[in-house]
């Protein structure tokens, strides 16, 4: 079963979330569109279980590309192919420590649930609801981390700041590096990107993917949540 590939993932139904009656949450979802992540976070919510399992079982990184074999068909995914599939920005920061310090300072107040500034490594409960959700989306869908997300890491806080203040990020490089870690044997990076990988696999000529499955409703963010 590929349940471990989707158990912590979150998919955003962008056609629905703008019906949420909360200005802060709506602005947060709008920030994903502004930063260029709409096609990655809101791609078709279907996956191909057997193909995904085989993709990860046979996956590796070779010459900077993610390479695998599914049903005897070779799959090669370059960063360029990855970026084009999701219309990802290819220019901007690749080192999050370069997020402007004045914006980080402002974010410490903006994110805070109280009048006190939060630390850049804080507990999620210290933040406003929209930034708690932003943290969860990044932890589950961008970094694909396993375990508890009660503590917001410095890396995640800096990325939250970049998204909130529309700092240009090279999302192609950041996300593709995570994908490469997923298929690297012995890596501690959790597996994920289930529906995104399936978008890529559907574009491989001659590849038979088998039966598709709908992404579980509890893992889809919509105005009904």
Image (cartoon, rainbow, N blue to C red):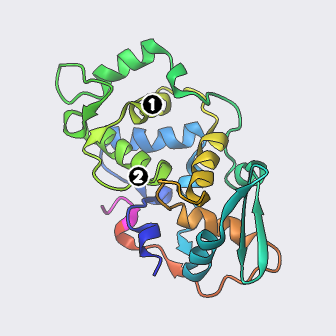
Ranked by sequence position, the earlier of labels 2 and 1 is: 2
* Residue 193 at x, y percent in the picture: 54, 60
**Which residue is painted at 24% across and 44% down in the image?**
150
Q: In this view, does 197 lie to the left or right of 30?
A: right
The stretch of residues the image draws in magenta is 219-225
Q: Quadrant of the N terminus?
A: bottom left
Question: How many numbered marks does the figure carry?
Answer: 2
What residue appears at the point 35 percent right and 35 percent down from the top-left corner? 153
Mark 1 crowdedness (10 Å alpha carbons): few <14, some 14-19, many ≥20? many
Q: What is the quadrant of residue 95 in the picture? A: top right
Whether 202 is among the magenta residues is no
Which residue position holds label 1? 164
- Residue 97 sits above or below residue 124 on the image: above
Within the image, what quadrant is residue 69 found in? bottom right
In the rendered image, residue 220 lying in the magenta stretch gets the answer: yes
The location of residue 15, given as percent across then percent down, is 49, 58
Report the quarter where the C terminus lies.
Answer: bottom left
**What crowding class fits label 2: few (fewer than 14 Cα within 10 Å), some (14-19), or many (20 or more)?**
some
Query: Which residue is at the front of the view, 122 or 17?
Result: 122
Q: What element carries label 1?
A: helix
SS at circle 2: loop
Query: Whole-Å distance between the Cαs marked 2 and 1?
Result: 21 Å
Using residue 153 as the reference point, say whether residue 50 is left or right of it: right
């Amino acid at each position: 079963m590929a349940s471990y590939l989707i158990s912590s993932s979150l998919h955003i139904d962008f056609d629905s979330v703008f019906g949420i009656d909360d200005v802060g949450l709506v602005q947060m979802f709008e920030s994903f569109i502004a930063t260029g992540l709409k096609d990655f976070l809101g791609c078709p919510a279907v996956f191909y279980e057997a193909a995904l399992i085989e993709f990860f079982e046979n996956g590796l990184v070779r010459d900077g590309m993610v390479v695998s074999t599914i049903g005897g068909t070779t799959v090669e995914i370059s960063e360029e192919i990855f970026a084009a599939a999701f219309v990802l920005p290819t220019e901007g920061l690749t080192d999050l420590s370069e997020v402007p310090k004045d914006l980080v300072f402002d974010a410490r107040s903006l994110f805070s649930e109280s009048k006190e500034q939060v630390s850049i490594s804080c507990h999620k409960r210290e933040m406003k609801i929209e930034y708690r959700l932003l943290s969860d989306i990044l932890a589950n869908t961008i970094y694909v981390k396993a375990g508890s997300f009660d503590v917001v890491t410095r890396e995640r806080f800096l990325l939250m700041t970049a998204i909130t203040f529309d700092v240009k990020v090279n999302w192609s490089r950041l996300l593709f590096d995570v994908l490469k870690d997923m298929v690297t044997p012995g890596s501690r990076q959790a597996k994920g990107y289930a529906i995104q990988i399936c978008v890529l696999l559907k574009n491989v000529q001659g590849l038979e993917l088998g039966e598709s499955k709908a992404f579980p409703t509890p893992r889809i963010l919509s105005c009904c949540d």
